[in-house]
Image (tube, rainbow, N blue to C red):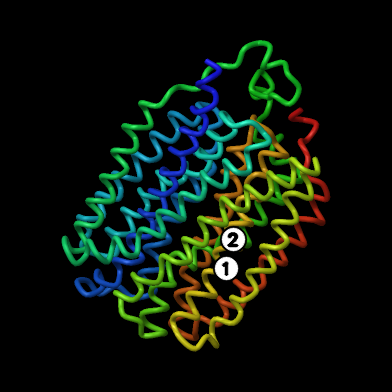
Amino acid sequence: MKRNLTWIPWLIVAMTFFATALSFLDRQVLSISIIKIKEDFHISDIEYGFINTGFLISYAIMFTVGGILIDRYGSRLGLAFSVGIWSFATLLHSLANNAFQFGLFRFILGIGEGGAFPGAIKAVVEWVPKHRQALANGIAIGGSALGAVVAPPLCVYLIGVTGWRGVFLITGAFGIFWVTAWLLCPKQKAATPEQTNQKGDNTGSKQNRVNLIEILKIKEVWVFILIRFLLDPIFYFYMFWIPKYLNEAREIDINLIGKLFWIPFLALGISNMLGGWISDKMYKKTGNLNSARKMIMGFAALLTAPALLVKIAPNAEWVILIISIAFFAHGLWITNYITSISDIFGKTITSTIIGFSGSAGALSSLILNPVIGLIISRFSYDPVWIYAGSMYSIAFIAFIIFIPKIKLLKAFQ
């Protein structure tokens, strides 16, 4: 049994890594394939914005619903259903013939993907000890970068071999294989009475006494919600619009986009894990949880400022460099942001808070994504770059003001 405890948690973490990789792979496929899809069907920028909105509507709802259900039923069932649903939705994309159908299938995709990150973080909290959780979270969410790194070259290659419809069939099949492997993994053992009564362990009866009304009365919950509301539109802009920006505003061929657009996501994946590793090292060395998380987040906020310079970048390579720096900064930021949630709320409602905050970010993006389409079509990309380069610093200032110290709240001790 002791031997199992040394490797099973990291097997689970590895599986969450591949789950989030599939999540971002399946999201990113459309942003690459749309360049070829538009050759078959006339889809305007505004229609493309609404297609993405279909995803964001269900994603916004299911991020919260998924988080609540995963806190109740655990990560094992939660992630199995989540990955299964979105993989089926990815397969359905191969049948689409117009903007409405793409929007409908993106909606189903969002239903599944809403549980991806709450489920991954819940698995980390269930299996990994506190002093390793930042690193484990970095690995779990770092898989998203792998999926995004693989997506551009893989999609470009598969489009040439199978056409854009075949891309959705192949990537959807990956998820079905993952679900099978996940259900074969060991189950989480139930906590013993002695473990349940240990200080700081809140897997017992206290979970049943926490309801949504009580959660929403906690100030720190709203801080995390507000931050995601402000920042998530930036990352969705990067995800959904950069390939089109490079193709249309910079006149970059789809093949060069496939060769370059994986680089920012590689930077993201590295910084996800690096941000967690450094934070855990700082915490272990100093014992100061607050400084360990906030120093990384503050540095990350400063690193996003070069996004202000995209409009004067001389060529595509410089654009990719600036975006790569922004992605690296986001990876440092989001790993410590998510770990801070588990630091403050413990095991009982971490997935629920991640769900609330993720829904806020998706809702904000849902509102702004069609607006971005209007801004781009009528003006330019410049206002979006200004927002992207300044908002992380503003959010960090709000974070340190309203959460002066990161620590487990008394209600969850």
Position in image of residue 213 (x %, y %) = 68, 36
In which quarter of the view is residue 96 placed?
A: bottom left
Residue 396 appears left or right of 325: right
Q: For the C terminus, which image quadrant?
A: top right
Residue lying furthest top: 193
Q: Secondary structure at mark 2?
A: helix
Instruction: Give the labeled residue for mark 1.
Output: 326
Q: Residues within 10 Å of mark 2 (few under 14, many from 20)?
A: many
Q: Nearer the viewer, residue 360 or 393?
A: 393
Task: Looking at the picture, tell me which residue is in the foreground, 206 or 201.
Answer: 201
Looking at the rendered structure, the secondary structure element under dot 1 is helix
Residue drawn at 74 percent across, 47 percent down = 282
Contact? badges 2 and 1 (CB < 8 Å): yes
Question: Going by the image, does 408 lie left or right of 232?
Answer: right
Q: Residues within 10 Å of mark 1 (few under 14, many from 20)?
A: many
Q: What amino acid is found at the position of numbered circle 2 in the picture?
A: His
Question: Picture quarter containing residue 263?
Answer: bottom left
* Cα–Cα span, label 2 and label 1: 6 Å
Q: Is residue 351 above or below residue 164?
A: above
The image shows residue 18 at horizontal and vertical percentages of 41, 44
State whether residue 79 is above or below residue 138.
above
In the image, 367 versus 141, the foreground residue is: 141
167 is higher (above) or lower (below) than 138 = below
Q: Residue at x 59, y 38 (%)?
A: 352
Which residue is at 52% across, 69% downward? 324
Name the amino acid, label 1: Ala
Position of 319 compared to 306: left or right? Answer: left
Give the numbered dot on residue 47: none
Residue 330, label in figure: 2
